[in-house]
Image: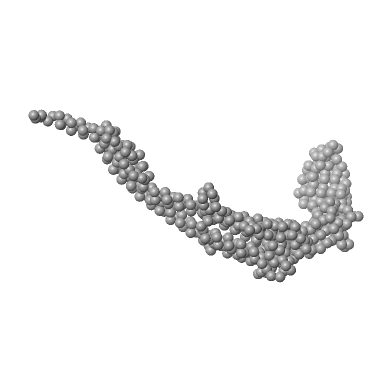
């Protein structure tokens, strides 16, 4: 951009009138014309930041994909989880641990576990006094004397006294239309916490409530009892949660692999993989508006990453009863490299060939998840990962540009001061021009005239 007198609003007329110039505007115009190299550097920095964002997004996608592969590889993960089902969840429900052995069991719940309770006849209210004495309470095999005297012969004070003794029961007050009652509830479920009032010389009449009894059930014809309605250990690795008694009903409990969870783990992997490969593919799609591809279209590392992923996802094992690659499981690849799940085929594999399915992913050293996981570990390495190397170079270039731009700005600041000084002098000279012309005219007018 060139600078001329006209561009500075300096004309013969303005000069003769002593109007001067706008120094700030002139200096800004000159500096703007000299910012060309800086503007180029700033645009380069913007481009690098855009590329950095795209690289980070891809890297994040790779990390998410690695998480899903690790879930398929995990020896305690979805592919080795067991699930237990009940044919009648109104009677019992069941859960299974990884250690549970597949199988089917018949369970009959004769009665549920219950907690021992006791209660009193009503008195007028919680602060009504009653006659003193001793209440003897048996909890399981232990006997306890509760002394009722003038310090605790109201329900309010008696509840406090009982709870402070830590007898293995919890005392409380229950009020209804008939008045207030003392309620005792055992802290131990089952027969071991049964409550019995064996003696009572106080005026507070006590009664036995519900008995404390163990749950009783049979599993495959064998009798079992449990102090709680959560039964563990009867079927190794399986927990039975008893809901109601049904002494005349058989409930079938089936234990086997969590096929639904395994199928979801495969779908999660496919989703994560498609997210990454689609993001890479988008870099090579031509945009007719901008007449160019994605910001990483010219990045050779991204092209290499694409090639590596396509190679790793098609990895095959040998043998394994024909389940040797993703396609044999019902996971198919489209022309653009994305995957889709044939649910019907996958469910058939899970139902009839689960051990082969599991072996495909988790076989020691040769399993699909082992292979792909190792490749992704390398690709996402914090220092040597293919995109992290690119990111390090990108950030280094951004740092260099930032330094260059700062140096350029420092030079422009010095240049600005020089221009301000220079054009301030010109401004002063232009403003003094009329006075100088008047002085010259006056001097010429005083000269003698010669004929």
Number of labels in the image equals 0
**Chosen colour scheme:** one colour
Task: Tell me the residue at 77%/45% (across/down).
Answer: 160
Residue 203 falls in which quadrant of the image? Answer: top right
On the question of residue 200 being in view, the answer is no
Task: Tell me the residue at 87%/62% (across/down).
Answer: 220
Q: Quadrant of the N terminus?
A: top left
The location of residue 78, given as percent across then percent down, is 71, 60
Residue 230 sits above or below residue 181 on the image:
below
In this orientation, which residue lies closer to the viewer: 243 or 422? Answer: 422
Residue 81 falls in which quadrant of the image? Answer: bottom right
**Would residue 417 appear left or right of 172 to someone viewing this image?**
left
Residue 334 falls in which quadrant of the image? Answer: bottom right
**Would residue 353 appear left or right of 374 to someone viewing this image?**
right
In this orientation, which residue lies closer to the viewer: 183 or 324? Answer: 324
Q: Quadrant of the C terminus?
A: top left
In this orientation, which residue lies closer to the viewer: 435 or 1? Answer: 1
**Would residue 12 appear left or right of 316 to someone viewing this image?**
left
The location of residue 215, given as percent across then percent down, is 85, 56
């Amino acid at each position: 951009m060139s600078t001329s007198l006209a561009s500075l609003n300096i004309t013969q007329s303005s000069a003769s009138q002593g109007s001067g110039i706008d120094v700030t505007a002139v200096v800004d115009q000159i500096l703007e014309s000299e910012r060309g190299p800086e503007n180029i550097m700033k645009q380069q920095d913007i481009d690098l930041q855009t590329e950095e964002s795209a690289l980070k997004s891809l890297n994040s996608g790779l990390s998410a994909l690695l998480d899903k592969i690790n879930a398929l590889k995990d020896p305690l993960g979805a592919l080795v989880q067991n699930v237990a089902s009940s044919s009648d969840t109104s009677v019992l429900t069941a859960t299974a641990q990884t250690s549970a052995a597949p199988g089917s069991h018949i369970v009959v719940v004769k009665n549920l576990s219950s907690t021992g309770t006791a209660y009193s006849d009503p008195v007028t209210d919680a602060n009504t006094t009653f006659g003193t004495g001793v209440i003897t309470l048996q909890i399981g095999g232990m006997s306890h004397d509760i002394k009722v005297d003038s310090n605790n012969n109201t329900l309010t004070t008696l509840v406090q006294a009982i709870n402070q003794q830590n007898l293995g029961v919890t005392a409380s007050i229950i009020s209804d239309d008939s008045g207030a009652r003392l309620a005792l509830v055992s802290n131990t479920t089952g027969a071991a916490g049964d409550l019995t009032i064996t003696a009572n010389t106080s005026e507070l009449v006590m009664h036995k409530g519900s008995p404390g009894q163990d749950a009783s059930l049979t599993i495959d014809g064998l009798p079992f009892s449990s102090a709680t309605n959560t039964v563990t250990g009867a079927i190794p690795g399986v927990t039975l949660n008893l809901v109601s008694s049904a002494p005349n009903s058989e409930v079938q409990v089936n234990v086997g692999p969590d096929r639904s969870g395994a199928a979801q783990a495969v779908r999660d992997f496919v989703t994560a993989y498609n997210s990454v490969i689609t993001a890479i593919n988008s870099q090579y799609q031509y945009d007719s508006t901008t007449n160019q591809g994605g910001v990483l279209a010219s990045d050779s590392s991204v092209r290499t990453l694409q090639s590596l992923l396509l190679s790793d996802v098609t990895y095959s094992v040998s043998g394994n009863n024909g389940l040797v690659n993703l396609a044999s499981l019902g996971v198919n690849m489209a022309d653009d490299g994305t995957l889709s799940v044939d649910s019907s085929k996958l469910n058939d594999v899970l139902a009839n060939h689960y051990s082969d399915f599991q072996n495909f992913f988790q076989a020691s050293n040769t399993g699909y998840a082992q292979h792909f996981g190792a490749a992704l570990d390398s690709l996402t390495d914090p220092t040597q990962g293919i995109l992290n190397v690119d990111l390090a170079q990108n950030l280094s270039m951004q740092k260099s540009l930032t330094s260059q731009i700062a140096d350029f700005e420092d030079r422009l600041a010095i240049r600005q001061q020089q221009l301000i000084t220079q054009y301030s002098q010109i401004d002063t000279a232009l403003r003094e021009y009329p006075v100088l012309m008047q002085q010259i005219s006056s001097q010429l007018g005083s000269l003698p005239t010669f004929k």
